[in-house]
Image (cartoon, rainbow, N blue to C red):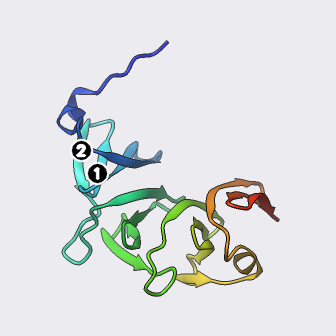
Amino acid sequence: GGRFVTPSFLEPYREMSFMALTYDARNDILYASTNGNGVFRINLAQRTITPYARDEVNNIVWVDELFFDKDGELWINDAMKNYVYDTKTSKNKQLTLIDDVVVSTAARIQKGKQIYFGTDHGLFIYDKQQGKFVENQQTDMLKDDKIKALELKQNSLWFSSNKGLGCLD
């Protein structure tokens, strides 16, 4: 069996409401989002925790979803907006999925240079090379679905939604 243990360096945060986690395996860093206190960067080797991905322009506070991509960028969904945080430049870039609509992101997954967003408003695809969202037959087919989970198996994108399970080849 196991037991629940809070490491001593995390003790001051024990009562904080954490929402999501993502892990950077290259640097042994755990990112943790909170309900009201933004994102924290937890250096597991050094046993330190610091506020992260905040600046004067984007005060990211209510973070409900995180995703760390294969290129070293941190994708953040807060209560109002989606961001990508470039860990090399320490800058946030706000992304708009649908004009003037808050889009809750349930899942993200990377396929090559594209990031797939599963949302309550369907599937969105962000092309990192073009630096923008792209539309195609896949996004059109799933426009009215509430995408809750994504999984990639070779070139097939599996998803769960309010209309069942599906697979895009």
Tag 1: residue type?
Answer: Phe
Whether residue 104 is situated above or below residue 48 in the rendered picture: below
Please name whichever residue, 104 or 26, is drawn nearer the observer in this view of the structure. 104
Which residue is pictured at 36% across the width and 63% down the height?
87
The answer to whether residue 23 of the structure is visible from this angle is yes
Q: How far from the left and from the top, in percent, is residue 52? A: 27, 58
Q: Residues within 10 Å of mark 2 (few under 14, many from 20)?
A: some
The answer to whether residue 155 of the structure is visible from this angle is no
Tag 2: residue type?
Answer: Ile
* Label 1 residue SS: strand
As drawn, the label of residue 129 is: none
In the picture, measured across the screen, residue 56 lies left or right of residue 52, that is left
Q: How far from the left and from the top, in percent, is residue 100? A: 43, 86
In the picture, measured across the screen, residue 158 lies left or right of residue 55, that is right
| The C terminus - image quarter | bottom right
Which residue is pictured at 70% across the width and 58% down the height?
159
Q: Quadrant of residue 15?
A: top left
Please name whichever residue, 89 or 102, is drawn nearer the observer in this view of the structure. 102
Do labels 1 and 2 touch, CB within 8 Å? yes
Whether residue 145 is situated above or below residue 95 in the rendered picture: above
Q: How far from the left and from the top, in percent, is residue 64? A: 40, 57
Q: Which residue is mark 2?
A: 49
Extreme-right residue of the structure? 169
Q: Which residue is mark 1?
A: 40
Earlier in the chain: of badge 1 and badge 2, it is 1
Which residue is pictured at 76% across the width and 76% down the height?
141
Whether residue 69 is situated above or below residue 47 in the rendered picture: below
Q: How much space separates mark 1 and mark 2, taking CA atoms? A: 6 Å
Q: How far from the left and from the top, in percent, is residue 165? A: 76, 55
